[in-house]
Image (spheres, rainbow, N blue to C red):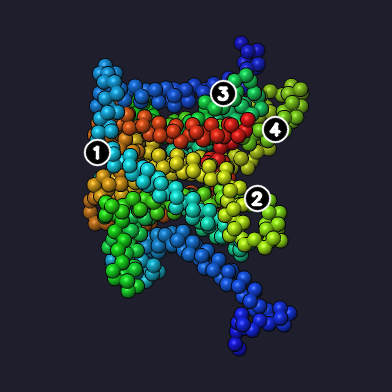
Amino acid sequence: MRRFLQRHVSQVALSPSLALIAIFLYGFIAYTAAVSTTNSKAFPRFDNFVGLEQYWRLFHTPRWHVAFTNMFLFGGLFLLITILLGLLIAILIDQRIRAESFFRSIVMYPMAMSFVVTGIIWQWLLNPTLGIEVMVHQLGFTSFRLDWLTNPDTVIWALVVAAFWQGCGLVMALFLAGLRGIDEDIWKAAAVDGIPAWRVYVFIVIPMLAPVFLTVVVLLSLSIVRAFDLVVALTNGGPGVSSDLPSVFMFDMAFRRTNLGLSAASAVVMLGTVLAILIPYLYVETRERA
Amino acid sequence: MPAPTDATPRPARSGWLTPRRSKAMLKRAVLYLLLAVVAFFFAGPLYILLSTSFKTMPEIQAGGLMALPHEPTVQPWVTAWGEACIGITCGGLKGYFGNSMVMAIPAVLISVMIGAINGYALAKWPFPGARFVFAALVAGNFVPFQVVLAPVSVTLRTLGLFGSVEGLILIHVIYGIPITTMLFRNFFLSVPNDLIKAARIDGAGFFWIFFRIVLPLSPSVIVVALILQFTGIWNDFLFAVSFSNPSSAPMTVALNNLVNSNFGVKEYNVHMAATVIAAAPTLILYILLGRYFLRGMTAGAVKG
């Protein structure tokens, strides 16, 4: 026994973690998938198999449609804006500026903040009677409207701006690291040939950052599917259900509406969305390494 | 003195403002202007948060979002810390701040310890199938936790830990395994194998090498892991709101309940003070250990 332990000490040290992950991750995913095929209400029950009916019901629930569409709407806008501006800010900071670490710290500190804190800060800034709107009115622009939090058509922008404020720092840092990793000789060669800087960026440097783009897109996409706290703190899904996301729908069904079967189906769809992002990414990654 | 224009260029030696130089200066000016806009966008909210937290309610209602407080008061902070009503109890945030600390500190220490041992085992004591074990553990980083909420809830109830700080510690430790394992395994790959081999020839065992050789070589990754886990656990809302009850709720839940409750008059200054208190621990870590902080965030973000 002692000799076995000594010879397999590495496996023995890993086995508690592996057991916990096997149960709490893989086992629980299977459990949720199983619950999604039942008609469970307040408590999980496995004696009322309904097949894929919960999935059928899910995609015929108007609120889920709003939430699922919002995920792509919010996600698309957030991805586009964060990548474009994150890259632009990284390029600005990479111009041998003074006080570089000062600017970097200012762009990055929000990532220390939780999404609850971020949501509350932006709820305050976007407050229609006391926030930015009133501030702009007092500057003399009285026709200025910033009613994102109360207008169902534009509330998604509140989520986008707040998520950008919190997440831009990481994206900027990743791009900046990418820019710093590029061979200085490219810039020297371009200067000798008299090529303007913007052309070097567009045609040479940015294409070289392709791996960083891939990483950033995957990271942000994962955070989009998971986004929960920000919505709860900033809009609580409102006005009405206009800023609902799948995670909020899932939580509501599980803990407030006691509809565990439907909730489980929505959670499985969320996991499926993540896999749809991840599997092509891992495929590209492993193919490149081989 | 008239400024030289493009039409009357001076020789570069006698005047410093040649067309080429003035164009370069204009570019620099535009650059710093853009950077100032960026800095304003990111720093402005924190400034407004802080200044609002020292204002009186009448001053807030008078407008002037960007103005410094006329008559600074610490009353909002006193109220937020010790008197504000959260749910049906009116004891401020201090109890919840304590809950968060009592939850985060052990959860961080235990999960970092487990991750270090796992990473060391995977990187330095490989065995057939080690790569598969690593992949199986690390895949947990990508799973949206919504998919485990219901079974975790059932499990915690069965164990009698639902609604307790201990239950939250357990959950954070378990779901911290993937990220800490990945972080340490990737770092330990860079520790020279010769060191381990030499120690093994001398008869040193698994844990002796871990505590005497590997850990002393890795203070930076330990700091990075501590920051990453502390930030993640302190800022967590999903597990907190799912598995705590009013007496064990961490800060994120209490803050959300305070600010987003529909009862009573909204005291925005108290809300802002409460928000600063909730953000303070991770913000202080960022200010003190910014470099490690960024490494933690990117390590947690970028695959190994």
Q: Nearer the viewer, mark 4 or mark 3?
A: 3
Quick check: do tags 2 and 1 share a chain? yes
Q: Residue A135 placed where, x, y %?
A: 34, 68
Q: Quadrant of the N terminus of chain B?
A: bottom right
Give the Cα separation between the discs numbered 1 and 4.
59 Å
Name the residue at 27% across, 28% down.
Answer: A56
Q: Which residue is mark 3?
A: B132
Q: Nearer the viewer, residue B33 or B150?
A: B33
Q: Position of residue A278 (x, y in %)?
A: 48, 34
Q: Secondary structure at mark 2?
A: loop
Mark 3 residue type:
Phe
Looking at the rendered structure, the kind of residue marked 2 is Ile
Q: Quadrant of the C terminus of chain B?
A: top right
In the rendered structure, which amino acid carries the disc numbered 1? Pro
Number of the label disc, if any, that sits on residue A182 = 2
Determine the residue positioned at 61% across, 52% down: A205
